[in-house]
Amino acid sequence: MREIKFRAWHKVHREWLSDPIINQYISIIAGEFITPTNVILNQFTGLLDKNGKEIYEGDRLDGIMGDGYIGYCEKCKSFEFFGDDFGCYACSGDFYWSEAVDLAREIEVIGNIYENTNLRMVKEIAGKSIS
């Protein structure tokens, strides 16, 4: 069973909230998480990248799944991989996040969709190839 935990991004202050502060923003009513509109919760996927870093929804990944991010797909009712210009890969039948369990040793978290909105451009400037 995977550990259930969250991180929280404050949209106004544009920073991650520390663990003790997250609890001040989260209310649970009838099993639903209620947060103010200025806070975005990201859930831990239960996977670690090749460097041992926890992978959360909203994380941008490099490796075999470069130029995309992890998100919750309402249609699939699960975490899935989203391409920047494509949408949910599972909805097209192309790639399911559950397949990433075997591929985690090749995946690397290189940022997230909140702090790193222009990662594709950053990778081009750094001279890294884009898959």
Image: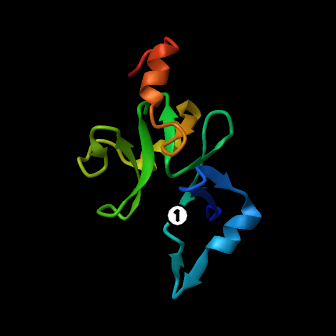
Residue corresponding to mark 1? 38
Nearer to us in this view, 8 or 57: 8
- Residue farthest to the bottom, as pictured: 30
Please state the total of marks drawn on the protein image: 1
Q: Is residue 13 above or below residue 117?
A: below
Residue 97 visible in the displayed image: yes
- Residue farthest to the front, as pictured: 12
Q: Tell me which amino acid carries mark 1.
A: Asn
Q: How is the image coloured?
A: rainbow
How would you rate the neighbour count of disc 1 (Cα within 10 Å): few for under 14, some for 14-19, many for 20 or more? few
Nearer to us in this view, 50 or 101: 50
Q: Is residue 121 above or below residue 20?
A: above
Please identify the quadrant where the N terminus is shown. bottom right
The residue at the point 47 percent across, 30 percent down is 119
The residue at the point 64 percent across, 63 percent down is 5
Q: Secondary structure at mark 1?
A: loop
The residue at the point 55 percent across, 41 percent down is 115
Please identify the quadrant where the C terminus is shown. top left
The residue at the point 45 percent across, 47 percent down is 70
Residue 117 at what x, y percent from top left?
Answer: 46, 37
Residue 72 at what x, y percent from top left?
Answer: 41, 58
Residue 128 visible in the displayed image: no
- Residue farthest to the right, as pictured: 20
- Residue farthest to the left, as pictured: 92
Is 80 on the left-hand or right-hand side of 57? left
Residue 124 at what x, y percent from top left?
Answer: 44, 17
Q: Is residue 38 above or below residue 87?
A: below
Is 7 on the left-hand or right-hand side of 112? right
Q: Is residue 17 above or below residue 24?
A: above
User: Picture quarter containing residue 129?
Assistant: top left
